[in-house]
Image: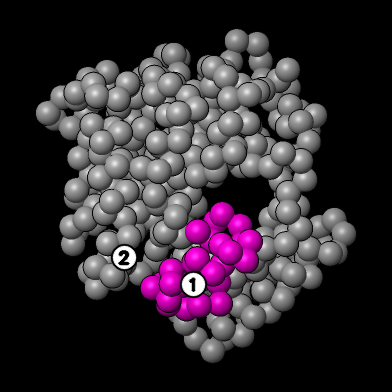
Amino acid sequence: MALPDFFIAGAPKAGTTALHAALARHPALYMSPVKEPKFFMTNGPPPNQGGPGDIKTYREHIWRQSEYEKLFEASPGGQLRGESTPFYLYNHAAQLRIRKLVPAAKLIVILRDPVERAHSNWTHLWSAGLDPIDDFIRACEAEDRRIAEGWADFWHYLHLGMYGRQLEHLYSVFPPEQVLIFRYRALVTDPTAVLDGVCRFLGVPDGRLAEIPRENVTAHPRSTARHRSVARLMRAGSNLASVLPGQVGSSVTDALQRRLQADGQPRQPLTWEQRRLLLPRFEADIRLLESLTGEEFSDWLEPRGESGGLVGARPRGQQQARNGRPRDF
């Protein structure tokens, strides 16, 4: 079977697209031409309902195994095959499906400050015209209701950042030595060290990759009457796209997307007040994450933003060097 040897498993809005593009340049690695196939997200066809735009996204899932294997058939002999679906870390059932089909799989996990990650996630969907709530905190307050109504995982702004719970389950499915963890900020500030560490983890020569392509940068359009009007059309168009054949619906929503992004500004930074309101939701999970990894993440509970530092791929309890990098990096 033409199946992957490794996965970039998460988290969303934490550099998975950029890492996928960087690893695709390594001569010993073959990355799936569809970056996010989501094959292990369902055991059969994906759902046919959800939040704004979800049905259109579900239609893009590659859920038939024969089609999934075709993604890797072009890989030359001797190359390791990989794919990147950043929801595998969050989705417990997906982890079990991976183990059943690829028990020796290696999984790469990127952790980002959970409040920053949630804000980037909301900005992505709001700027795309899909989230009707134009305030980040109010959108987070709606999360539990949306989950109960069956909205897709990408709407789970806060839950997607509960890395302690996710890793606790992942370590019950795969041994920790098959999991590599590092911080998003390290990918930004020291990409060469991260890429070399990933290569060593996968067992391919390092020193071949030195930079991360600039990928997946979300613009932040101004909240204007025009944006709100086009966003309403976008949500209606996404619902329409779910029932139109082929690429007809996508052409409609793509045109609206371009209009929405026409006056986009850089993503607005989080304020300390916004962080202060959300940090209590993450504190217990961050402590769980620390106990699982043996690393400190208390900086995520502070007023300032993200910080660097790699977290190693090693059994739980193994100590790391005081310089903040795993001994094997």
Q: How many marks?
A: 2
Q: Which residue is mark 2?
A: 278
Quick check: is 192 in the magenta stretch?
no
Q: Which residue is mark 1?
A: 142
Evaluate whether residue 84 shows in this view.
no
199, above or below 37, in the image: above
> Which quadrant of the figure has residue 125?
bottom right
| Drawn side of residue 64 relative to residue 118, left or right | right
Residue lying at the far top of the rendered structure: 78
Which quadrant would the C terminus be assigned to in this image?
top left
Q: Residue at x 50, y 34 (%)?
A: 8
Residue 93 drawn at (x, y percent): 59, 39
Q: Residue at x 76, y 58 (%)?
A: 48
| Drawn side of residue 269 relative to residue 202, left or right | left
Q: Amino acid at mark 1?
A: Ala
61, above or below 153, in the image: above
Around disc 2, counting alpha carbons within 10 Å, would you say few (fewer than 14), some (14 to 19), or many (20 or more)?
some
Residue 153 drawn at (x, y percent): 56, 54
Q: Residue at x 49, y 72 (%)?
A: 142
Per the rendered image, the range of residues in magenta is 131-156
Depth check: 54 or 309 in front? Answer: 54
Disc on the earlier residue, 1 or 2: 1
> Which quadrant of the figure has residue 258?
bottom right
Quick check: is 142 in the magenta stretch?
yes
Q: Secondary structure at mark 1?
A: loop
